[in-house]
Image (cartoon, rainbow, N blue to C red):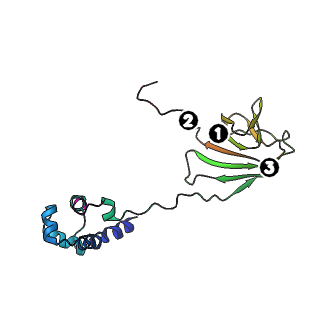
Amino acid sequence: MANEDSVALAAVGPRLRALRQQRGTTLTQLAELTGISVSTLSRLESGNRKPTLELLLPLARAHQVPLDELVDSPVAGDPRVRPKPIVRHGITFLPLTRRPGGVQAFKLIFPPDASAGERNQQSHEGYEWLYVLSGRLRLLLGENDLTLTEGEVAEFDTRIPHRILNPGPGTAEALVLFGPQGERLHVRARPATGEQR
Protein backbone atom coordinates (compact mmCIF):
# COMPACT_ATOMS: atom_id res chain seq x y z
CA MET A 1 0.00 0.00 0.00
CA ALA A 2 2.80 2.45 0.92
CA ASN A 3 4.58 1.59 -2.34
CA GLU A 4 1.41 2.35 -4.34
CA ASP A 5 1.15 5.70 -2.55
CA SER A 6 4.80 6.52 -3.39
CA VAL A 7 4.23 5.70 -7.07
CA ALA A 8 1.07 7.85 -7.16
CA LEU A 9 2.87 10.80 -5.50
CA ALA A 10 5.88 10.49 -7.83
CA ALA A 11 3.56 10.79 -10.84
CA VAL A 12 2.05 14.10 -9.63
CA GLY A 13 4.98 16.26 -10.80
CA PRO A 14 5.03 15.11 -14.43
CA ARG A 15 1.22 15.34 -14.52
CA LEU A 16 1.35 18.95 -13.24
CA ARG A 17 3.97 19.87 -15.87
CA ALA A 18 1.92 18.26 -18.66
CA LEU A 19 -1.25 20.11 -17.59
CA ARG A 20 0.58 23.44 -17.47
CA GLN A 21 2.21 22.92 -20.86
CA GLN A 22 -1.07 21.79 -22.49
CA ARG A 23 -2.62 25.07 -21.39
CA GLY A 24 0.39 27.10 -22.56
CA THR A 25 0.91 28.58 -19.08
CA THR A 26 4.32 29.60 -17.75
CA LEU A 27 5.51 28.92 -14.21
CA THR A 28 5.33 32.68 -13.53
CA GLN A 29 1.70 32.88 -14.69
CA LEU A 30 0.79 29.82 -12.60
CA ALA A 31 2.53 31.33 -9.56
CA GLU A 32 0.41 34.48 -9.94
CA LEU A 33 -2.80 32.42 -10.23
CA THR A 34 -2.09 30.17 -7.25
CA GLY A 35 0.05 32.25 -4.89
CA ILE A 36 2.67 29.46 -4.92
CA SER A 37 6.24 30.56 -5.63
CA VAL A 38 7.88 29.75 -8.96
CA SER A 39 10.62 27.75 -7.22
CA THR A 40 8.06 25.63 -5.35
CA LEU A 41 6.13 24.98 -8.57
CA SER A 42 9.35 24.03 -10.36
CA ARG A 43 10.37 21.63 -7.57
CA LEU A 44 6.85 20.09 -7.57
CA GLU A 45 6.97 19.48 -11.32
CA SER A 46 10.47 17.97 -11.16
CA GLY A 47 9.55 15.71 -8.23
CA ASN A 48 11.96 17.42 -5.81
CA ARG A 49 9.07 18.66 -3.64
CA LYS A 50 6.46 16.37 -2.12
CA PRO A 51 2.92 17.40 -3.12
CA THR A 52 0.67 18.39 -0.24
CA LEU A 53 -3.02 19.14 -0.11
CA GLU A 54 -2.24 22.84 0.51
CA LEU A 55 -0.31 22.94 -2.79
CA LEU A 56 -2.60 20.69 -4.85
CA LEU A 57 -5.91 22.44 -4.07
CA PRO A 58 -4.95 25.81 -5.64
CA LEU A 59 -3.32 23.99 -8.58
CA ALA A 60 -6.49 21.97 -9.23
CA ARG A 61 -8.51 25.23 -9.20
CA ALA A 62 -6.04 26.98 -11.51
CA HIS A 63 -6.05 24.09 -14.00
CA GLN A 64 -9.83 23.64 -13.55
CA VAL A 65 -9.54 19.90 -12.93
CA PRO A 66 -10.75 17.71 -10.07
CA LEU A 67 -8.14 17.04 -7.39
CA ASP A 68 -8.19 13.30 -8.07
CA GLU A 69 -7.04 13.99 -11.65
CA LEU A 70 -3.83 15.50 -10.27
CA VAL A 71 -3.06 12.48 -8.09
CA ASP A 72 -4.59 9.97 -10.51
CA SER A 73 -6.63 8.12 -7.92
CA PRO A 74 -6.51 4.39 -8.56
CA VAL A 75 -9.48 3.01 -10.43
CA ALA A 76 -11.59 0.69 -8.31
CA GLY A 77 -10.89 -2.95 -9.03
CA ASP A 78 -13.35 -5.32 -10.61
CA PRO A 79 -16.22 -5.52 -8.07
CA ARG A 80 -17.67 -8.73 -9.49
CA VAL A 81 -17.63 -11.73 -7.17
CA ARG A 82 -16.50 -14.88 -8.94
CA PRO A 83 -17.79 -17.61 -6.65
CA LYS A 84 -16.21 -21.02 -6.43
CA PRO A 85 -19.03 -23.52 -5.92
CA ILE A 86 -19.02 -25.72 -2.82
CA VAL A 87 -21.18 -28.85 -2.86
CA ARG A 88 -22.40 -30.33 0.44
CA HIS A 89 -24.99 -33.11 0.66
CA GLY A 90 -25.88 -32.44 -3.00
CA ILE A 91 -26.60 -28.73 -2.37
CA THR A 92 -24.44 -26.26 -4.32
CA PHE A 93 -23.32 -23.18 -2.33
CA LEU A 94 -22.13 -20.15 -4.32
CA PRO A 95 -20.54 -17.60 -1.93
CA LEU A 96 -21.54 -14.05 -2.89
CA THR A 97 -19.39 -12.27 -0.31
CA ARG A 98 -15.62 -12.35 -0.05
CA ARG A 99 -14.76 -11.00 3.37
CA PRO A 100 -14.80 -13.19 6.44
CA GLY A 101 -16.97 -12.39 9.45
CA GLY A 102 -20.26 -10.54 9.56
CA VAL A 103 -23.23 -11.42 7.42
CA GLN A 104 -22.40 -13.84 4.59
CA ALA A 105 -24.44 -14.15 1.37
CA PHE A 106 -24.86 -17.35 -0.63
CA LYS A 107 -26.85 -18.54 -3.61
CA LEU A 108 -27.95 -22.12 -2.94
CA ILE A 109 -29.03 -24.60 -5.60
CA PHE A 110 -31.07 -27.52 -4.28
CA PRO A 111 -31.60 -30.62 -6.44
CA PRO A 112 -34.88 -32.50 -5.90
CA ASP A 113 -34.55 -34.60 -2.73
CA ALA A 114 -36.58 -37.84 -2.50
CA SER A 115 -35.41 -38.42 1.08
CA ALA A 116 -36.73 -35.06 2.27
CA GLY A 117 -38.24 -36.29 5.53
CA GLU A 118 -35.48 -38.72 6.49
CA ARG A 119 -32.76 -36.34 7.66
CA ASN A 120 -32.37 -34.85 11.12
CA GLN A 121 -32.69 -31.15 11.75
CA GLN A 122 -29.52 -29.28 12.77
CA SER A 123 -28.98 -26.25 14.97
CA HIS A 124 -26.03 -23.87 15.39
CA GLU A 125 -25.25 -20.29 16.40
CA GLY A 126 -26.42 -17.59 14.01
CA TYR A 127 -29.36 -16.08 12.22
CA GLU A 128 -30.52 -16.85 8.68
CA TRP A 129 -32.58 -15.09 6.03
CA LEU A 130 -33.83 -17.18 3.09
CA TYR A 131 -35.36 -15.90 -0.17
CA VAL A 132 -36.66 -18.43 -2.72
CA LEU A 133 -35.55 -17.43 -6.23
CA SER A 134 -37.14 -20.36 -8.08
CA GLY A 135 -38.82 -23.69 -7.36
CA ARG A 136 -40.14 -24.79 -3.96
CA LEU A 137 -38.32 -25.32 -0.68
CA ARG A 138 -39.44 -27.17 2.39
CA LEU A 139 -38.33 -25.55 5.64
CA LEU A 140 -38.43 -27.77 8.70
CA LEU A 141 -38.06 -25.38 11.63
CA GLY A 142 -38.59 -26.89 15.05
CA GLU A 143 -42.19 -28.17 14.98
CA ASN A 144 -43.04 -26.19 11.83
CA ASP A 145 -43.10 -27.79 8.38
CA LEU A 146 -43.38 -24.99 5.78
CA THR A 147 -43.36 -24.95 1.99
CA LEU A 148 -41.88 -21.79 0.51
CA THR A 149 -42.42 -20.86 -3.13
CA GLU A 150 -40.78 -18.39 -5.48
CA GLY A 151 -40.59 -14.90 -3.96
CA GLU A 152 -41.27 -16.00 -0.38
CA VAL A 153 -38.92 -15.14 2.47
CA ALA A 154 -38.21 -16.74 5.83
CA GLU A 155 -35.91 -15.59 8.59
CA PHE A 156 -35.05 -17.54 11.70
CA ASP A 157 -32.65 -18.06 14.58
CA THR A 158 -30.44 -21.00 13.60
CA ARG A 159 -30.32 -22.22 17.20
CA ILE A 160 -33.80 -23.61 16.47
CA PRO A 161 -33.38 -27.07 14.89
CA HIS A 162 -33.92 -26.69 11.15
CA ARG A 163 -33.47 -28.27 7.73
CA ILE A 164 -34.05 -26.86 4.22
CA LEU A 165 -35.02 -29.36 1.52
CA ASN A 166 -36.33 -29.39 -2.02
CA PRO A 167 -39.47 -31.53 -2.32
CA GLY A 168 -39.21 -31.33 -6.13
CA PRO A 169 -40.08 -31.94 -8.81
CA GLY A 170 -37.37 -29.62 -10.25
CA THR A 171 -34.32 -27.77 -8.98
CA ALA A 172 -34.85 -24.92 -6.49
CA GLU A 173 -32.66 -21.87 -5.98
CA ALA A 174 -32.45 -19.53 -3.01
CA LEU A 175 -30.54 -16.53 -1.76
CA VAL A 176 -29.39 -16.99 1.83
CA LEU A 177 -27.91 -14.40 4.19
CA PHE A 178 -26.34 -15.89 7.28
CA GLY A 179 -25.04 -14.04 10.32
CA PRO A 180 -22.79 -16.34 12.38
CA GLN A 181 -23.06 -14.15 15.48
CA GLY A 182 -26.83 -13.80 15.25
CA GLU A 183 -26.89 -10.58 13.24
CA ARG A 184 -30.36 -9.92 11.95
CA LEU A 185 -31.12 -8.50 8.56
CA HIS A 186 -32.84 -5.12 8.68
CA VAL A 187 -35.03 -4.37 5.67
CA ARG A 188 -36.69 -0.97 5.31
CA ALA A 189 -39.71 -0.47 3.09
CA ARG A 190 -39.03 3.27 2.98
CA PRO A 191 -36.12 5.53 3.95
CA ALA A 192 -35.71 6.20 7.65
CA THR A 193 -36.85 9.59 8.87
CA GLY A 194 -35.26 11.72 11.54
CA GLU A 195 -37.96 10.69 14.02
CA GLN A 196 -37.10 8.27 16.83
CA ARG A 197 -39.30 5.20 16.99
Q: Nearer the viewer, mark 1 or mark 2?
A: 2
**Residue under circle 2?**
187
Of the two numbered discs 3 and 1 in the rendering, the one whose residue sits closer to the viewer: 3
Q: Amino acid at mark 1?
A: Glu
Q: Do tag 1 and tag 2 residues touch (Cβ < 8 Å)?
A: no
Tally of numbered tags = 3
Q: Residue furthest bottom?
A: 46
Q: Which residue is mark 1?
A: 128
**Neighbour tally class for label 1: few under 14, some 14-19, many 20 plus, Cα within 10 Å:** many
Report the amino acid beneath label 2: Val
Q: Quadrant of residue 152?
A: top right
Across and down, in percent, residue 178 comes to: 62, 43
The residue at which mark 3 appears reads as 111
Tag of residue 91: none
| Drawn side of residue 5 relative to residue 24, left or right | right
Tag 3: residue type? Pro
Magenta residues (range): 60-65
Q: Residue at x 24, y 74 (%)?
A: 21
